Amino acid sequence: MTTRQALLLIDLQNDFCRGGALAVSEGDDTIAVANHYAAEFSRRQQPVVATLDWHPASHGSFASNAAQQPWSLGELAGLPQVWWPAHCVQHTHGAELHPALDQRFLTDRVCKGEDPLVDSYSGFYDNGHRKKTNLDTLLKSYGITALTIMGLATDYCVKFSVLDALSLGYTVTVISAGCRGVNLTAGDAERALTEMAAKGAVIL
Ligand code: VGL
Ligand code: ZN
């Protein structure tokens, strides 16, 4: 069987970078890594897919909409939920891909998090695993069996995308130099990488 590879860039959006609504420490440092790998995949004619966190202003994960303190914990759609500052609102600057990301290499963009009633960390499913995005179908249409994954944030959208990719049967490599974490609790990003490795991802 032949292995077909794709690069999956998770949520490299302004709101997760310096000055953004949900800025991740050193988030901007992932962009040069993304450009390096995207150029390489592109040169080999392998797909480069970017996910975008793409929320309506009414999204239920926003602290303001839930009348809760940002960064505190609650429940949404029957699932544990961090109340986030409003971020990645559709069609706003914060939701745009980072300006330094070389978008010429992107073959596809996949949006997630549009349903206001449930959060969606993974690029494949909402957090309740009730609805699928078009990502798996897209990758299968290319005949992809192996994914190289990086982006923001290590402990949320990267982690859940990697775990879903593994359970969907993809071989997964994570570029840790291209990931940064929220670290709501110190060590979260490190623990996320450990969990991804334990479930079968190769961590570079
Ligand atoms: C993310 C928190 C809320 C992420 C998205 O991209 O990791 N984190 N929405
Ligand atoms: Zn979000």
Image (cartoon, rainbow, N blue to C red):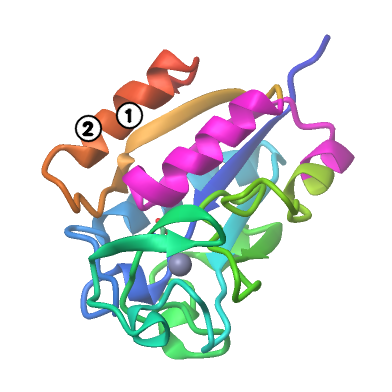
Residue 151 belongs to the span the image colors magenta: yes
Q: Quadrant of ligand 1?
A: bottom left
**Residue labelled with disc 1:** 193
In the displayed structure, does residue 20 sit left or right of residue 161?
A: left
Q: Residue at x 40, y 78 (%)?
A: 62
Q: Nearer the viewer, residue 57 or 143?
A: 57
Residue 203 seen in render: no
Work out whether 68 lies above or below 133: below
Name which residue type carries label 1. Leu
In the displayed structure, does residue 70 sit left or right of residue 40?
A: left
Location of the N terminus (image quadrant): top right
- Is ligand 1 less than 8 Å from the beta carbon at label 2? no
How far from the left and from the top, in percent, is residue 136?
76, 43
User: What is the span of residues highlighted in magenta in the rendered image?
Assistant: 139-168
Q: Residue at x 53, y 31 (%)?
A: 163
Location of the C terminus (image quadrant): top left
> Dot 1: what SS?
helix
How far from the left and from the top, in percent, is residue 13?
43, 70
Name which residue type carries label 2. Glu
How far from the left and from the top, in percent, is residue 44?
66, 36
> Dot 2: what SS?
helix
What is the spatial separation of the Cα atoms under label 2 and label 1, in whole angstroms?
A: 5 Å
